[in-house]
Image (cartoon, rainbow, N blue to C red):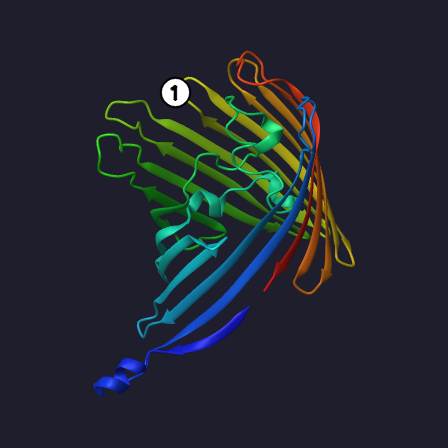
Amino acid sequence: MRKLLLGTTALAAATSMATSVALADVSVSGSYEFTYISQDSGIASAGSSFDSFTNDSDVKFSFTNKTDSGLTIGMHVVMEGGNEDESNMTISGGFGKLQLGADDGAGDQLTRTAHDLVGPDALNDGGGAVLGSGGNLADDNADLINDVNDQNAITYILPSMGGLTIGATYRDAGSGTANNDDETVVAAKYAFESGAVKGSLHYGSNNIGGTTAGAGSLNSNSMAIDVSTGPFRAVIAKAESDVTTTVQTEVTDYGIQYNVGNGLTLAAVGTQVEENTGGETSDITTVSAKYNLASGLDAYITYHDYDYEDGTTGTTADDDGSYTQITLKATF
């Protein structure tokens, strides 16, 4: 990360009207991921190699200014793949933190999933190959499935009180007759410590209004426990989310991580995904290894064994296969 001081003196010098100089703390950081993906699908597809390369780059510009009254005012912009991904302003102080703009909401900040233990983007929101395609399974991990993520919204995080942190996010979908699907998220985290054991409890809920006036709303919720002691860390999480007003996706994941030492960390995660009607399911076993090659350079290997059954959806075929990702990530 690069840090520098930015002086807003150019205009003052030109007009000779300023009596003081405002200074902001500025930081620039970034990361780059290059990934090789190989899938051994149980569905025959003539001519398909099931191999691919992907990449992901992020550059983050952060500005922070402290006022005489004790407030901290900040903003940041994240460029992902050359496009603006986040743009956000924060105002924080003794009252907590107010977040305005496109950034992760309270649900993203305060909920957990066992897939936090494995490599970056090992399983992605929306499912990818391990969930088949076109069915009713909304996600492949037990975070808050429907959530405000890098969307223009207002978030307020209360100051921590005895280990308890509570936050809420509101996203307005727009002013048109088909834009009534406003979104409200409430989430909480309780951190605790007992001897050599550290842990946290997590809960989040989300409500999305009907797209048009009078239409049914969609709800989701997530709860988890995250515990660590010495080199071990374990997470158990469960989530439910409405796909429609009658169909729901349910996800349970559980995993353990072990820091071997000398830059090596191992993890294993089990995941069950199912819909409440129709019998569509996906069972996933994931193992992952992270190795620190050098300062700011990490290698990840993640392997998924999955068994997808389409039940009565009739939109796709059963698939019993595997999915491997090898990622090299550099941070700056």
Q: Depth check: 19 or 2 in front?
A: 2
Q: What secondary structure is found at the residue carrying circle 1?
A: loop
On the image, the x and y values in percent for residue 301 come to 72, 45
Residue 310 vs 147, above or below: the answer is above
Identified at 52% across, 56% down, the residue is 58
Residue 180 visible in rendering: yes
Q: Quadrant of residue 67?
A: bottom left
Q: Could you tell me if residue 18 is visible in this image?
A: no
Residue at image position (44%, 65%) is 62
Q: Quadrant of residue 23?
A: bottom left
For badge 1, the amino acid type reads: Thr
Q: Nearer the viewer, residue 327 or 270?
A: 327
Q: Is residue 323 above or below residue 136?
A: below
- In the image, is 331 to the left or to the right of 68? right
| Quadrant of the rendered image containing residue 237 | top right
> Along the horizontal axis of the image, is 235 left or right of 265?
left
Furthest-front residue in this view: 47
Q: Position of residue 199 (x, y in %)?
A: 60, 47
Name above or below for residue 157 compared with residue 5.
Answer: above
Mark 1 neighbour class, 10 Å CA radius: few under 14, some 14 to 19, many 20 or more: few
Q: Residue drawn 45% across and 57% down? A: 78
Is 33 above or below relative to 135?
below
Name, please, the residue furthest toward the top: 312
Q: Quadrant of the C terminus?
A: bottom right
Count of numbered circles on the image: 1
* Residue tagged 1: 245
Residue occupying the point 30% across, 28% down = 211
In the picture, which quadrant includes the N terminus?
bottom right
Q: Which x, y percent locates residue 298?
A: 69, 56
